[in-house]
Image (spheres, helix red, strand yellow):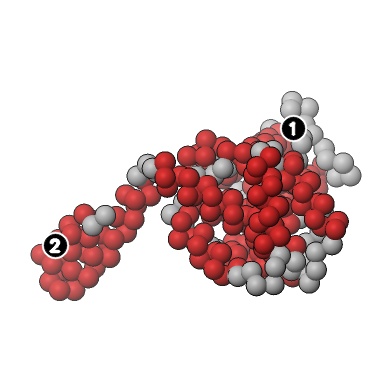
Amino acid sequence: MVTGKIIGGSLGFLVAGPLGVLIGLYVGHQFDKGLIGLRPMSAEDQARTRDTFFDTLFSVLGHLAKADGRITPAEIAHAEGLMGKMGLSSDHRKKAIELFKLGAQSDFSLKSTMDNFVSVCGRQGNLKRSLLNYLIALAIADGELHAAEQQVLRNVAGHLGFSAALFDQLLAMINAQSQFKGSSSGAGGHRSSGQSSADQLKAAYTALGVQPSQSDAQIKRAYRKLTSENHPDKLIGQGMPEDMIKLATERTQEIRTAYEIIVASRK
């Protein structure tokens, strides 16, 4: 894809000479990257993306489990339980366990794994964010996040191009979203077990990554953005394995519940 670079370089030369060529080439390059991102994925590209996403997720999950030095039988059982809840096919579940064990080996290279993921899936922003979201959600599913696990997740975020501040925000958002798992606000509202209304509302704002001081319109935009990022059809179109969409569907419901709680509190 060089059309943008050719046009940009030519126009740049006409307007500003040699310096304009450099500027035009840069602008054209960004334009070409945008066109590539908009171009429909071929069946071959989708298959490669699905395999890469799957392999990366479960091998890094094994690496996370080993972060504190050893993997206990309880951690293995917990990982297998998570795989069952995700709705994986029997073949994918078997492969996921193999990848988990591979990631737990001492010679596993997180850098090589993430470099490969970025090279294949790097143009799909939603997939990069979904990978990090999934890893965080699975890491905190046992109710605690060790310092060593958090450092691995920070390294993953860095490889994906996310800043430390954005990682901290995502971690807080996913922690808050998990409080609304399996719940629906409905007409009468919902209160998580052990939570006061004030605590629940605070968690709802955190789940959407917004502040109580923001306007209704700003909060609605944040809600729509999160819903779009986790929309199953969009993720499948970008190459996410279909039997892994259950997590995205659950997250969409959690986000919706948090948004409805905020809306109800503002009436």
Q: Which residue is mark 2?
A: 10
Residue 26, position in %: x, y?
27, 65
Quadrant of residue 43 within the rendered picture: top left
Front residue of 133 and 189:
133
Q: Tell which residue pokes out farthest to the right in this image.
A: 194
Q: Is residue 157 above or below residue 260?
A: below
Is residue 228 shown to the viewer in this render? no
Quadrant of the drawing holding the N terminus: bottom left
Amino acid at pointer 2: Ser
Camera-nearest label, 2 or 1:
2
- Could you tell me which residue is drawn at 48 percent across and 54 percent down? 121
Residue 180, position in %: x, y?
75, 41
Q: Is residue 258 above or below residue 168?
A: above
- Could you tell me which residue is drawn at 60 percent across and 70 percent down? 109
- Could you tell me which residue is drawn at 72 percent across and 46 percent down? 83
Mark 2: give few (<14), some (14-19) or many (20+) Cα within 10 Å. Answer: some
Q: Which mark is residue 184?
A: 1
Q: Is residue 207 above or below residue 66?
A: above
Q: Earlier in the sequence, mark 2 or mark 1?
A: 2
- Could you tell me which residue is drawn at 51 percent across and 65 percent down? 115
Indicate the secondary structure of the residue bearing disc 1.
loop
